[in-house]
Image (cartoon, rainbow, N blue to C red):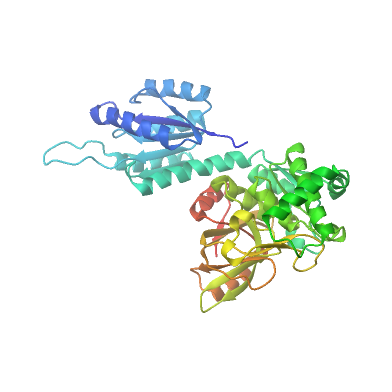
Amino acid sequence: MKQKLNVGVVVTLSGRWPRELPNRRFEEYGGWLERSLPESRVFRFEKLIGSREDMAECIETFKKQEVELVIQVYGAFTGDDICCGLADALHVPIVLWAPREEQWVRDDRLYANALCSAAMNGASMKRIGAEHHIVFGNKEEERVHSEILRIVNAYAVVKNMRGITFGLFGYRPTAFYNCSFDEVVIRRTFGIDIEETDLKVVFDRMAVLDEKEVQDEVSHVRSLWDIDSVPEEYLENHARLYLTLKTLMPEQKYEYASIKCWPEMGNLHTTPCAVLGRLADEGLFISCEGDVDAAIAAVASNLITGLSPFITDLINIDEAENTVTFWHCGNAAPSLHNEEDSVKMCDHPLAGAGTAFWCSLKEGPVTAARFSNIDGHYRLFLLRGQAVPTTRCTRGSMVNVKVNTPVLELVSKIAESGMSHHYSVIWQDIADELILIARLLNIPVIEL
């Protein structure tokens, strides 16, 4: 279950400034934050902070509320003592939010001087090593709204990644060295705990399922997709694997997982591509080919959006259209399918012996991402793009994505950087959110 971030809200001023505007911002901005952050627990300190005594009272209150991020709205100019005092006592990041100046009238006073204050406070925060962000603009501005949400959501994702139990169903396929991983570095970097369930447990559970439950699931699959080309044995194994993983994941308390999907699963005629796609849309994400590092990017993307990621290869480029083709064996979630191009559940497109979705994928903005451990330190690789109308031209699941970087230059960047071959693609533009998350985790970003 996704944990909510505890966000503290304060409105500040230095004691000598008039309080009419700060009081109004206390009501308007404090109320706006309470309404606009429904996925967080928002705690608004009950009064303006204009003195060290107010600050001390706020600190005690926020400690009891276990506040993890503070948003400091400038009611008016505020000295460095408030933000630095909050940072020192609470040890949490602080967002310094400076609304725009009120409409000026000739010979009237300066009403807030918030931007100057935020710059001054930010410089002091930098000098004491306190984590902070500066936001400028009014709550009515879409840019500001997006920026506040992006910051809050980034901290929420980092919080939710820490403590995740990531399950391994097997290790990695034969000769896929780039799908190996270092669980100690993962634990240190992301706070993710890794545990393992042997594939034999999966196969044993598949074998003892209730026959009626299996046949009911087979009938359900027949009602949803064109499955005429799937051998009966493979379809039954699909149902058995789907039912098994659907119960094993919560039973083992795995929030996310990866699976060694070949060669053993193919040898037993149960290659899992279509099963993985179905489970992703049900909130049970299992990455294929044992690629944990690609899966971590999928975890972050899913936590940001709630959408199903697509673990995929980049297999082709088109210089004339400046597009890249993402393809994989057939693991794309049904929510990603382009129904206008026909969708079939078929045998595995390369090795056979299982089920896979043969389809093109839908249009829309996409973000392709991957975390890679290079020499013991993680990098985040990012590619922004737009999925364009695609007609499937080979077996499996595929989509063409238009990108900004010239595609031949993109190939060179991939080669020079040492990036591995799997990407996690999500159907939303979340590149800026992922960049901020990487920054919070001290991970360099390489935009392709």
Relative to 29, residue 402 above or below: below
**353 or 253, which is in the foreground?**
353
Seen from the viewer's position, the closer of residues 199 and 447 is: 199
* Res. 125 visible in picture: yes
Q: Nearer the viewer, residue 73 or 333?
A: 333
Q: In percent of the image, x 77 and y 41: which residue is there?
A: 248
Kindly identify the residue that appears in the image at 46 percent across and 24 percent down.
59
Q: Is residue 45 left or right of residue 430?
A: left
Residue extending furthest toward the bottom: 320
Image quarter of residue 421: bottom right
Residue 276, position in %: x, y? Answer: 71, 53
As displayed, is residue 79 above or below residue 106?
A: above
Is residue 418 in sight in this rendering?
no
Q: What's the residue at 73%, 46% (across, down)?
A: 184
Dividing the picture into quadrants, the one containing residue 423 is bottom right
Percent position of residue 404, x then y:
48, 68
Q: Position of residue 105 (x, y in %)?
A: 13, 40
Viewport quadrant of the C terminus: bottom right
Quarter the N terminus occupies: top right
Label count reads 0
Q: Is residue 179 left or right of residue 10?
A: right
